[in-house]
Amino acid sequence: MAMMTTRLLTLAALGLVLAGCQTMTAQERRARDETTCASYGFRRGTDAFATCLQRIELDRRAESRAFRYDNDFVMRRPYYWY
């Protein structure tokens, strides 16, 4: 029984890891961004709507840069390595 429980837990953990690896397509991301801007009250086809989409994309890029910087050992070397 313990062996079966171990296998079941291992399988469940593997499933969770694989589920976390899902990525969105560009079309899915755009649709989600448009839904977000529409939920803020912006109407499609307006300059404000386009600005909202642009700001979401710029935020996404800034988060990506920050993540890369935080996880890059070369960028975070101690000062005495220079």
Image (cartoon, helix red, strand yellow):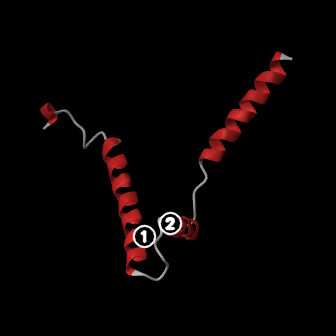
Q: Which residue is mark 2?
A: 33
Q: Is residue 35 left or right of residue 5?
A: left
Mark 2 is on which residue type? Answer: Asp
- Residue at far bottom of view: 45
Above or below for 30 versus 64: below
Q: Give percent across and percent down for residue 17.
A: 63, 40
Residue sitting at x 26%, y 42%: 74
How much space separates mark 1 and mark 2, taking CA atoms? Answer: 6 Å
| Label pair 1/2, CB-CB below 8 angstroms | yes
Q: Is residue 7 left or right of residue 13?
A: right
Disc marking residue 15: none
Q: Give percent across and percent down for residue 38.
A: 51, 69
Q: Is residue 55 left or right of residue 81?
A: right
Above or below for 48 versus 72: below
Residue sitting at x 47%, y 65%: 40
Quadrant in the picture for the C terminus = top left
Above or below for 17 versus 53: above
Quadrant in the picture for the N terminus = top right
Q: Along the line of sight, which residue is nearer the eye, 20 or 3?
A: 20
Q: What SS does tag 2 mark? A: helix
Count of picture labels: 2
Q: What SS does tag 1 mark? A: helix
Disc marking residue 53: 1
Mark 1 vs 2, N-terminal side: 2
- Residue at far top of view: 2
Mark 1 is on which residue type? Answer: Leu
Q: Give percent across and percent down for residue 63.
A: 37, 52
Q: Quadrant of residue 27?
A: bottom right
Would you call the spot at circle 2 few (<14 residues within 10 Å), some (14-19), or many (20 or more)? some
Residue sitting at x 48%, y 77%: 43
